[in-house]
Amino acid sequence: MLIQINDVYKIYGEGLESEVRALDGVTLSIDRGEFVAIVGQSGSGKSTMMNVLGCLDIPTRGDYFLDGTNVRELTDKELSHIRNRQIGFIFQQYNLIQNLNVLENVELPLIYQGINADDRHDMAMEALERVGLAGRVKHRPAEMSGGQQQRVAIARAIATHPPIIMADEPTGALDSHTGHEVLQFLQQLNREGTTVILITHDNGIAATAPRCVRLQDGKIVEDREQEVDWL
């Protein structure tokens, strides 16, 4: 089992009248190589779920085992190490650094891993070739369309060959054609063995994943396999 969360709560203002249970006793298992959509409306807890699964936040209560390691027992430094090694993130707003060019943006997580300059360059170029941007390495984000910026963000996420990709509303800022291309790429990564966790509010986008987990008011209200038309 790659991911296992057991009776996880994430509570803000615990004990206060304004207490919010963003996650309210959630248990979930994800096997290596799965493609899972976590779907829910605003306020359902899906972003909190991604933050917990992505080791960006730790639960108030409950346990999270990532590849056998109990995340709640790790230091901030150890959590950062796991994020760098295990997880590639794709966000709705790309999160590119504006004063770095495309190649430098993709190399950034490789620098954090301590990879030498030559290997870093080769790994970043390989990732950029995969997303069709090897010819744009000197461009800065502001010189590119939204779809191109998201492809840079995908290249950055896959450059380290992480076993897990977490995509938070990855098509939210894109037109339908470009969004379709992004979802195709996530499906391709999954076919190659990457575990993909897709966070979305859109049922149509959730339908591209073979498994759909629906959140409402911090609880899982549905967890089902579904037939998928591969894009």
Image: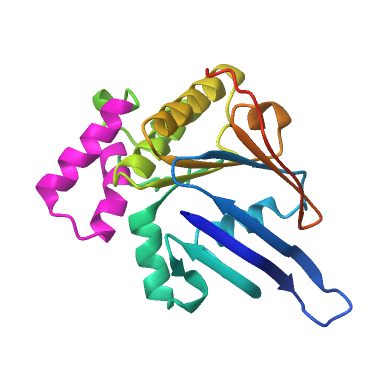
The magenta-colored residue range is: 102-130
At x 77% / y 44%, what residue is drawn?
41
Q: Is residue 194 something that shows in the picture?
A: yes
Instruction: Judge whether 218 appears above or below 147 on screen.
Output: below
Q: Main secondary structure of the magenta part?
A: helix
- Hey, which residue is sitting farthest bottom in the picture? 15
Q: Position of residue 89 (x, y in %)?
A: 46, 47
Q: x%, y% of residue 159?
A: 29, 42
| Residue at 35 percent of width and 41 percent of height | 158
Q: Is residue 139 above or below residue 222?
A: above
Residue placed furthest toward the right: 17
Rendered location of residue 6, percent (x, y): 63, 65
Q: Is residue 37 magenta?
A: no
Q: Is residue 138 visible?
A: no
Relative horizontal placement of residue 191, taking residue 128 as reference (left or right): right
State the residue at coordinates (59%, 62%).
5
From this view, report whether residue 72 is shown above or below residue 208. Answer: below
